[in-house]
Image (tube, helix red, strand yellow):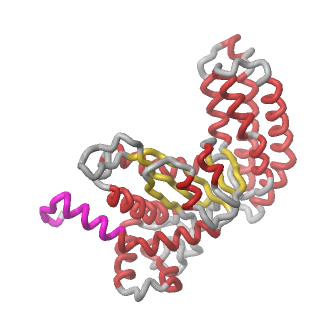
Amino acid sequence: MLGANLSRQTLSNWIMATADEFKPVYDLMRENLLKSHYVQADETTVVVVDSKGEDSKAKKYMWLYKTGEPKNPIILYDYQKTRSSSCPKEFLKGFSGILQTDGYAGYNHVENIERLYCLAHIRRKYFDIVSKLKDEALKTSRALIGFNFCEQLYKIEKDLKDNYEGNDDYYKKRYEIRLEKSAPIIEDFITYVDIEIKNALPRSPLGEALEYSRKLLPSFRTFLTDGSIEIDNNASERAIKSFVIGRKNWLLCNTPKGAMASATIYSVVETAKSNGLVVEKYLVYLMDMLCNLQNNDKDTLLKYMPWSKELPEDIFLKNKNLHGKKD
């Protein structure tokens, strides 16, 4: 745009230098995420070139952690060389709340948390079966029963949003109505799985769906204990989608340091977006403020975080009032 001819290496170095400057912001966002009572997590693969300049055959991973509460959302990416359970265990050290994920067992090693699984992943197992059936085969399918349990639970959530979202007592209403309407459905779903799994072929699509449900549904009762938690992990999957879309364009990271820089930059950008900020304006403002910050003073740094009420008005998207700002 300015007519400057910059090499890819120069641009990459600038981005990694910027990521280094953003590290205190990232660390403070993580500190606040660990203080929340509800976190969602997901992970996806990323190709990183090894020290010899060749594509590594071993899969590398970009992990994502997101606060579940809609107020002051925080989205963090964390690059790791493996999908080992040690990755979320280490990243979430100090967190003691509800952790919502898919059924990947690697999250089971996170300490001092209560697991909550994602209904969308359970539903998908049954949908993959019933979506291929027609007419009489669909009507008599035992998988349709499991699918309908999921649909009933989602219908209750939709009605709650349509009728109560935006009200001061929204979470209280969700808690009360879930206990009244969703709890019996969950218990019936668990009973259905316990009965059907005895007769289903273990390696059949239905057998695998029932086994997946058998492992996850009992702890899904956690969903009934707090009106602020969601029925699925879709919000974290949407959050990681930005990285997945970017990956289709840039294909790989040239170095592990570049992958870590990407994690930092993506974290700041996606958290800014989720807090209703104009990303470009916020990044310029943040860099200006960091230049004048002495010793990364935490109290001062809090004023520049994406959820701060002290950010300039022009950084916010129009018609956004996520921080109590005037529209």
Does 5 appear in magenta?
A: yes
Picture quarter with the N terminus: bottom left
Residue 265 image point, x, y percent: 39, 63
> What's the residue at 70%, 45% (across, down)?
158
Q: Is residue 184 left or right of residue 223?
A: right
Residue nearest the observer in this picture, 166 or 153? 153
Q: Is residue 224 left or right of residue 304?
A: right
Residue 180 is at least partly visible in this image: yes
Residue 101 image point, x, y percent: 62, 48
Decide whether the magenta segment is chiefly helix, strand or loop.
helix
> What's the residue at 54%, 68% (across, down)?
30
Quadrant of the rendered image containing residue 122: top right
Residue 42 image point, x, y percent: 54, 49
> What's the residue at 76%, 46% (across, down)?
219
Looking at the rendering, the stretch of residues picked out in magenta corresponds to 2-19
> What's the residue at 52%, 70% (across, down)?
29
Residue nearest the observer in this picture, 82 or 26? 82
Counting labels gives 0
